[in-house]
């Protein structure tokens, strides 16, 4: 089945397929000079080994690869290339790379040199361990001083680095198969990338306690090496090579049940007029919640609130005012001034979500926490300024910041945070894999805050604000780049599938509200001027948000997928009956066996064939 690339991805720019490298039971995919999905005997050992360059805003450079050479036979492969990177002020960096693989060993060596000097926040290896089947499992860490420690990969998400001063890390791939990952050339440490919704633990070069950005000195080579050594103690006669997977993906009803969350849509002052013009679309979606963003620090005031009133008037549901409190003076005086402006605008939201503006910026390990009033003082001020209104707190940024600065929830009626899937990587596979991390995030929030009412969002593929640098990245060409304020896949079926997959992955969190889009603009359900979609046209994401909004309050039952990285599903039950909702998270057709989820009227006795990134809703008997 051939589908136009723009329909799938919102762009006709398509990443070239990876090159599959094989040496006996060891396999890896070579993509853009880095290794992805490193497997032994069919099991993923490492998610990636990459040599990365970060700018002073933690943006990722895309180097030019030249002189690429690939050689392989049955039991060995070798890759060599040069990567050239241009920084600001005509600075340049060249990396000489060699990758070799055998049946039980993989070596990735790199030498970086610059004739001009080169500023960077990080230049070197990042090694990603997967999380599914690894979280909470034993690990052995060798430190740079030679000490070896028996430990575990974190289960609940660690706010700070679980392992520091690393030289090697060993874990079990499967019974009687161990994988050692060894790093040379610098001191490495690991962070729990689930904080950012990445589906990995990341071991990276240069400890965060050291200053950044830093300079790579001119004409001084920087050499690093990462090695993966597999030790297979199985009896080869009793454990033949794993058979290739195939056939239909099976869905089976699970035991977990719950209630579908309310659905929110975010409205900013900048998009208020466009959102009001699209009121017919808003009424058709009928979300339960409008989340109005308000930031006095950038000039939002009475006029913004009056625009919110006009939109709230045509909205039949509830509204929340999301306040980024400047905290340039006392929280009580600033909250009281916002309350006066609300009174002048006659704006009466049902809830307030309040957080200091400075808390939108990340405070990484080793950094000095910025000045900020105590959060209890902020919440006390909100209670006084907005009497009789539900008060929420948490972070206007991501779970990372909430995990590192855990808000006192005693005065709060709900907690909230966002996520973003393109903080570290923006290729299609990495973005869709972030869905794997969501259950770990929600379980970690529940571990911290118990049964406190819990909201998530706005969480979109494009990044609305960068906690890790001074700006989000402009993306005029519609490329796949990390930290971009526009992402092409938001215009395609990829975005539709991602949003439904997101909703399925967080069902077990018992969310009060889930916000996955705006109405208009780069995060919206309809396209604006200057975008590749017809202005006012509905993005495919519209279908998911309308479906989820209609299901709010219905009961759900989990549906277990035999391949959750490819297909996710759940059953919703309301007064109209039971419906099986299924989504294909891949860019290829997938056959799905729904037979054990009772008989689907339109699918009884045969498999469901799902198109790339397609969703389906099947009535059940």
Image (cartoon, helix red, strand yellow):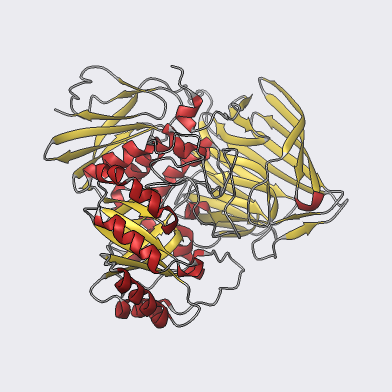
User: Is residue 606 visible from the viewing direction of this image?
Assistant: yes
User: Is residue 153 visible from the viewing direction of this image?
Assistant: no
Seen in the picture, residue 354 relative to 423 is either above or below; the reply is below
Residue at 64%, 52% in the rendered image: 204
Q: Quadrant of residue 77?
A: top right
Q: In this view, does 614 lie to the left or right of 34?
A: left
Q: In which quarter of the image is residue 585?
A: top left
Q: What percent of the width, then of the height, locates residue 117?
A: 83, 54
Q: Is residue 457 left or right of residue 191?
A: left
Q: What percent of the width, then of the height, locates residue 427?
A: 55, 38
Q: What percent of the width, then of the height, locates residue 166?
A: 65, 56
Seen in the picture, residue 201 relative to 616 is either above or below; the reply is below
Residue at 22%, 43% in the rendered image: 551
Q: Is residue 231 left or right of residue 321?
A: right
Q: How many numbered discs?
A: 0
Picture quarter with the N terminus: top left
Residue at 84%, 56% in the rendered image: 217
Picture quarter with the C terminus: top left
Q: Nearer the viewer, residue 398 or 211?
A: 398
Q: Which of 530 and 556 is in front in this view?
A: 530
Q: What percent of the width, then of the height, locates residue 267?
A: 38, 55
Q: In this view, does 491 lie to the left or right of 340?
A: right
Q: Nearer the viewer, residue 166 or 518?
A: 518
């Amino acid at each position: 089945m051939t589908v136009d690339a723009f329909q799938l991805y919102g762009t006709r720019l398509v990443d070239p397929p990876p090159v599959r490298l094989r040496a006996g039971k060891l396999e890896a995919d070579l993509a853009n000079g880095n290794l992805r999905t490193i497997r032994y005997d069919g099991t993923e050992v490492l998610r990636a080994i990459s040599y990365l360059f970060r700018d002073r805003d933690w943006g990722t450079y895309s180097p030019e690869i030249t002189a690429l050479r690939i050689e392989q036979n049955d039991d060995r492969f070798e890759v060599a290339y040069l990567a050239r990177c241009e920084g600001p002020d005509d600075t340049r960096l060249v990396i000489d790379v060699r990758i070799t693989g055998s049946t039980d060993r993989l070596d990735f060596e790199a030498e970086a040199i610059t004739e001009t000097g080169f500023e960077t926040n990080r230049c070197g290896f990042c090694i990603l361990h997967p999380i599914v089947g690894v979280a909470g499992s034993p690990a052995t860490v060798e430190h740079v001083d030679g000490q070896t420690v028996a430990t575990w990969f974190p289960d609940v998400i660690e706010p700070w680095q679980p392992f520091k001063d690393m030289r090697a890390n060993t874990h079990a791939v499967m019974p009687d198969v161990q994988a050692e990952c060894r790093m040379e050339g610098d001191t490495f440490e690991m962070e729990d990338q689930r904080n950012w919704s990445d589906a990995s633990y990341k071991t990276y070069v240069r400890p965060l306690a050291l200053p950044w950005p830093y300079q790579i000195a001119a004409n001084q080579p920087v050499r690093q090496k990462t090695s993966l050594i597999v030790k297979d103690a199985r009896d080869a006669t009793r454990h033949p090579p794993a058979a290739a997977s195939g056939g239909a993906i099976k869905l089976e009803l699970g035991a977990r049940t719950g209630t579908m969350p309310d659905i929110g849509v975010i409205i900013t002052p900048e998009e208020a007029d466009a959102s009001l013009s699209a009121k017919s679309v808003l009424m058709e979606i009928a979300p339960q919640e409008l989340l109005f963003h308000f930031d006095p620090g950038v000039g939002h005031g009475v006029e913004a609130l009056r625009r919110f009133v006009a939109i709230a008037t045509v909205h039949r549901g509830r509204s929340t005012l999301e306040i980024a409190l400047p905290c340039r003076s006392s929280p009580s005086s600033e909250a009281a001034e916002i309350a006066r402006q609300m009174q002048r605008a006659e704006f009466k939201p049902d809830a307030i979500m309040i957080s200091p503006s400075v808390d939108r910026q990340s405070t990484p390990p080793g950094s000095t926490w910025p000045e900020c009033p105590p959060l209890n003082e902020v919440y006390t001020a909100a209670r006084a300024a907005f009497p009789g209104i539900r008060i929420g707190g948490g972070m206007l940024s991501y779970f990372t910041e909430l995990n590192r600065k855990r808000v006192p929830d005693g005065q709060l009626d709900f907690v909230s945070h966002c996520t973003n899937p393109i903080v570290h990587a923006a290729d299609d596979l990495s973005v869709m894999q972030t869905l794997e991390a969501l259950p770990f995030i929600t379980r970690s929030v529940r571990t911290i805050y118990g049964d406190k009412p819990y909201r998530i969002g706005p969480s979109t593929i494009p990044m609305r604000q960068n906690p890790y640098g001074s700006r989000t990245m402009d993306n005029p060409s519609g490329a796949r780049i990390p930290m971009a304020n526009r992402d092409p896949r938001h215009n395609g079926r990829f975005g539709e599938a991602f949003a439904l997959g997101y909703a399925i992955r967080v069902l077990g969190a018992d969310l009060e509200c889930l916000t996955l889009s705006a109405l208009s603009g780069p995060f919206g359900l309809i396209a604006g001027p200057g975008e590749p979609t017809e202005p006012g046209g509905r993005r495919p994401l519209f279908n998911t948000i309308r479906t989820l909004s209609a299901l709010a309050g219905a009961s759900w039952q989990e549906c277990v997928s035999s391949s959750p990285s490819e297909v996710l599903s759940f059953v919703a039950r309301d007064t109209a009956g039971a419906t099986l909702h299924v989504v294909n998270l891949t860019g290829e057709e997938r056959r799905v066996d729904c037979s054990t989820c009772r008989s689907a009227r339109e699918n009884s006795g045969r498999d469901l064939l799902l198109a790339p990134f397609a969703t389906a809703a099947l009535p059940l008997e």
